[in-house]
Amino acid sequence: MKIFHRPSWSNLLLGLLIVFSILFPPFLLNSDYSYVLQLLVTVGLYMILAMGLNLVVGFLGLLDLGFMAFYAIGAYSMALLSCAGFGFWATLGLSVLLTMGFRLLLGAPVLRLRGDYLAIVTLGFGEITRIVLNNWDSLTQGPKGISLLTHPDVVPITFFGFHISNNLNFYYLTLFFVFVCATLSLRLKYSRIGRAWMAIREDEMAARLTGIQITRMKLIGFVISAGFAGIAGGIFARSQNFVTPESFTFWESVMLVAMVVIGGMGSVGGVLLGAAIVILVPEMLRSLLGSGFVSWRYFLFGLALVLIALYRPQGLWPNRRKIVELE
Amino acid sequence: MGQTLREIFKLFSRKNLDSGETVAPVILWPGPRCNPGRKSGSLPVRQAGRSNGRPGRGVGPLVLGLAGMVFLSTGFFSCKPAEKKIKIALAMPLTGDIASLGQGLKRAVTLAIEEANKNHLTPQPLELVVFDDRSDPREAVSVANRIASDRHVVAVIGHFNSGCSIPASRVYAQAGLAMLTPASSNPELTLQQLSPQWVYPKSIFRANTTDNVQGAFGADFVSSTLKLNRVAIIHDKSAYGQGVAEEFKKQFELNKGVVTAFEGLQVQDRDFRSLLTRVKATQPQALYFGGMFSEGGILVRQLRDIGFKGPFVTCEANYDPAFLKVAGEAAEGAYVTFLGSPPELLPTAQEFIVRYRERYPTDELKSYDAYGYETGNIIIDAIKTVGTDRAKIIEHLRGIKFTGVLGTTSFDEKGDTLNKAITLFQVKKGAFVHL
Amino acid sequence: MSIFNTLIEQLINGLTLGAIYALVALGYTMVYGILLMINFAHSEIFMMGAFVGCAVLTLCGALPAPLAMGLAVVGAMIVCGLAALGVEKLAYAPLRKASRLAPLISAIGVSIVLQNGFFLWRDDFLGFPNVIPERHFYFGPLHFSLIQLIILFSSLILMLGLWLFVNHTRFGQAIRACSQDREAAGLMGIPVNAMISLTFFIGASLGAAGGILYSLYYGSIKYNMGFVPGIKAFTAAVLGGIGNIPGAMVGGLILGMAESLGAAFLPQASWKDVFAFGILILVLVIRPSGLLGERTAEKV
């Protein structure tokens, strides 16, 4: 593994960041700032989700406004299978397969839609998923949600005999999957498939003429991205120990798109940055504003979104290929 | 399909077998280097980055971003714990759909704390730290972690939605912090403490009633007082509304009544005419609604609009001025159940109403404000008696017998209030009148 | 009551709801037609229309009801149109050459700002002045309330007006030219920016009118009231074929009907949105560019 392929400032900083993210968190445990750990778990989950969405929005150039549906499917499969007594790792695998299966079922008929028609179909599917979860009481317990903590059949998560229970353990679990997904994203990006995706994004007609099988390539992107959501959903269900349809609203899907665009579509590092910003900025505003102005948080957040869009329309850390093209 | 799978497998091998070209080595970050495999790539891309002598472009935004993060993260560490203050945390939805109820609760708890500080009830002044959970379970957990890790917080009042309270309660329990909710009514919230899997201290308390009590009360009222035996039930598909409605149904059927329809509506929807037309066709004598005033007000309005004349019975979340405002004349005659002794009759409650109006002349008293004031005072009472130790406060709450605006509150082994007195109001001439 | 009567009643409910969706959908579709952008902030303009209307009606409480209503509608249309113009100039115009999703993010930001701005001002329901008297009309088996008739009638007039404007005036021609090809239109001497502004103004004022009718019908307003009808109207616009003006009208009506019939005849009424979105997906699978959308070559 050549991480420092060619030493440079950004790689050095990146290396430092990785070392820091591995070594620092244990110091947070049992301090006044232990909540940061849980926050970082959330950030990590959204990073995985945003990387998944990035495959579709960033690499393929298709707008997806219902990505949360697959997060929900991942979380609910994890919750339901865990309650049936399956172990964590097996269930995680199964949830990933299930989300991918659902995505395949959805994707196959609608992928020939173009542009914003696809966006609205994904939005529709996202809403349908949420409503079904909320209404199918016999399976999902509807709005009451599924509680894993007090369910007798749930098996604790073990990793080679080591129990994953507190926020720090979940932090490392999430961090591990962030690395896995980031690596996978980058491998995909520079692979044959990734290049085919980007060709489709730039000009579908030209891509087709060069012999790229458009629908198949789009379907691969769709299905793999759902796998990312499945992983995030699975970890989410186990770290919260409680899933309810309230967590998977349309608004969350919109925020995911915002993460991808703010970070820089198609740039894996940018998307990670975008996810961190969208989750952390409102959280930081919370402390900066104090008790008196709590209600102003989202007002200021909206303002920040507008400003970022106006001053960095290409994203905070844009995709290099995009910059080069624009020059 | 086979070909597709092969493509995917190829991702994990270093060599791209078809063309013999090398795919980029495992890259963890898109650094400022050109991709060795791009020579035969399909995109015409000009070489850039290090090759033209500049330090990589990726660095600029990265450094900028990191600097920004460091700057913003001062936000995390900026709220240094204030000296010599006892903190009580309040976690409520202060933005989002039901923010007005959260804001009302915030006002009520603030009032309780201000009064305690004015009368020097506690050795050091109390400070209320307020957190917004947006009714979002994810934010609720994040808020809960934040509250639990602040050692100066001695107790929590919150959350509002059961969906938020349940995951957050575990964080508080783990930290041995008392949580007293003024509004979450899902039985599971406190029931989970009796499960053998619950390894934490039993620190969850609830000052309001659970769904089952109120639903059953409504059902008994309809069958024995109104003497009706055909009722249609509508709920808002939320944990709260559906819970109440199910309990109503259970009890009403026990009373040999017929439930002609049991339907859910979508929160934030505004058009229930179709649903009501359908429900009306089942020929009920009365309609029961489980849900919040935001839908209840519009529901009763449209119910009268389509010409249904039977009684409308609903639960305590509709005991709110906004219900009257939204429903207008249609609210006339509606029955609303409410937990606790009627505020009009208790002297302490009278004082509360007067003081609330004095303190907040422009705001209305919201449906849960009495609960908020009560929970605030229960916590203050605990601090007054046993000091600021988290464990001692839990211990004290367990055996507390507190008389306030809702009557006398004490908790059972689950942490639910034993004050299950329910009062009934009817809307008469645009106001709630105690029956 | 027979099944037939129920059906008729549900159709009228759906028609009324659909007329409002159609009015709001026009704003989405016009902006999309000219800029290819989803104007997420349109639902907040809708909300703003309701608030302005409420303010005007409260101020003009002494005037006779039809006059006050007229003032409220016109006032809200102008104020919201101007607000949309401002938003366009500040938040969208600088992004005209950026990637297609940048304006989307900007619009989401504007939407959050507007919604929370109104939230900070009024966090709860406001009663909307009830100026329409309760009256019912019967035409054979058909039964309308006065408010339903007013909604249907005024949305019909507004849509007719829009149709005449777009198809039979020079401005309308210019707007259509811009939405076909902005660059070429510019070369022909059409002031493209002015036309974009005009589109925003018209779309927003129709949305504002929709907001007033909506709140008259339901009797109360709140800062987040735009969200649900916004999504539904956007769905309606796509259903009819986005960028296509008659399409938005047809889409709105179909969606309103689908919801209404879904709530009436599905085994559980709470599945109605599944039904509505299901119809949308089905239509798009069969006709990938919406009901009335043109089949364009696949050039994204």
Image (spheres, rainbow, N blue to C red):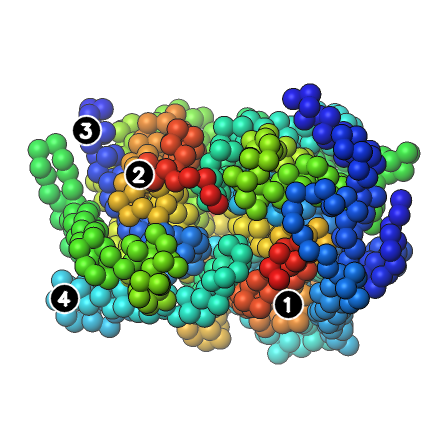
Can you say whether B309 is above or below C111 in the image? Answer: above
Q: Secondary structure at mark 1?
A: helix
Can you say whether C188 is above or below B317 in the image? Answer: below
Q: Which residue is mark 2?
A: C292
Q: Earlier in the sequence, mark 3 or mark 2?
A: 3
**Residue closer to the observer: B89 or C33:** C33
Instruction: Work out which quarter of the rendered image holds the N terminus of chain C and state it.
Output: top left
User: Which of the two discs, 4 and 2, sits closer to the camera?
Assistant: 2
Q: CA distance from mark 3 to mark 4?
A: 35 Å
Q: Which residue is mark 4?
A: C67
Looking at the rendering, which quadrant does residue C268 occupy? top left
Q: CA distance from mark 3 to mark 2?
A: 31 Å
Looking at the rendering, which quadrant does residue C295 occupy? top left
Looking at the picture, how far across and down is residue B104, in whole percent?
50, 63
**Residue closer to the observer: B418 or B183:** B183
Question: Is B237 on the left-hand or right-hand side of B11?
Answer: left
Q: Secondary structure at mark 3?
A: helix
User: Which of the two discs, 1 and 2, sits closer to the camera?
Assistant: 2
Label disc, if present, on residue A128 of the rendered structure: none
Q: Secondary structure at mark 2?
A: loop
Q: Chain of mark 1?
A: A
Q: Which residue is mark 3?
A: C5
Label 4, residues with CA under 10 Å away: few <14, some 14-19, many ≥20: few
Q: CA distance from mark 3 to mark 1?
A: 55 Å
Label 3, residues with CA under 10 Å away: few <14, some 14-19, many ≥20: few
Looking at the picture, how far across and down is residue B390, in whole percent?
77, 59
The amino acid type of the residue labelled 3 equals Asn
Number of labels in the image equals 4
Looking at the rendering, which quadrant does residue A148 occupy? top right
